Amino acid sequence: MSQTATINPRIIDGLYCEALVLSDEVRANFALPGRFDQSLIDQSLVEQGVVEEDLARVALSCEALRTTTRMMHAIAWLLNRRAFFTGELSEFQLRRQGRLSPVPSRTDPEHAALLDPRIRKLIAATERFYERLLRLDSGWREAEPMLPSGAIARLRERVGHSGVR
């Protein structure tokens, strides 16, 4: 059985850089300045009459929201880890508040089919990235159980020595 790698600052910094690049790509592709970008949907489906443009717009909006939410969750998780490694969060706070939530929302296959292939590829990349973070989070929680803080350990020791049980 393989051993889970310990999460360390170098791993988190690398993932953080990757998340920023991926988030910037998401922003660049989904940030529409008050207009509907025709290049984001599969125009061949609209031209063939397979799908109405309004349905494609809704699909694009839904997947844009899912994808940006997924990346916001990922960056928040990574920022919590960075704060822990710099001493801004205790392990207790990290374990209590820093859990990566289950996948915010999976891509709807029917919606994805209406989008341009490059957009589908970008969405899939964000899902793969998020799955990697979920595996790291899960492995870290299983491999490194939380030990009581020094203050709790000293209190338990004092109570144990005083004969109170």
Image: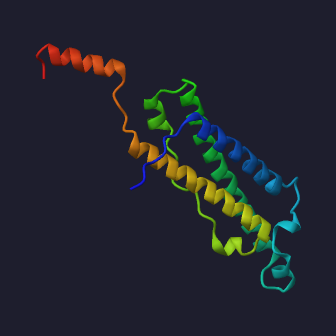
Colouring convention used in this rendered image of the protein:
rainbow
Query: Which image quarter: residue 57?
Result: bottom right
Q: Position of residue 126 (x, y in %)?
A: 67, 57
Residue 101 visible to the viewer: no
Residue displayed at 47% across by 27% down = 90
What residue is drawn where x is 51% and y is 54%?
102
Q: Nearer the viewer, residue 73 or 47?
A: 73
Return the residue nearer the eye: 7 or 112. 7
Q: Can you say whether 39 is above or below 1 in the image?
A: below
In the rendered structure, the answer to whether residue 63 lies left or right of residue 159 reads: right
Residue 126 as seen in the image, left or right of residue 134: right
Q: Position of residue 83 (x, y in %)?
A: 58, 29
Q: In this rendering, does residue 75 appear at all?
A: yes
Q: Quadrant of the N terminus?
A: bottom left
Residue 164 in which image quadrant = top left
Image location of residue 44, percent across then percent down: 85, 80
Q: Position of residue 107 (x, y in %)?
A: 63, 65
| 61 displayed left or right of 127 | right
What is the quadrant of the C terminus in the image?
top left
Report the label total.
Answer: 0
Say which residue appears at 85% left-offset and 76% top-offset. Answer: 43
Residue sticking out furthest to the left: 163
Q: Residue at x 59, y 63 (%)?
A: 106
User: On screen, 57 above or below 4?
Assistant: below
Locate residue 124: give its quadrant: bottom right
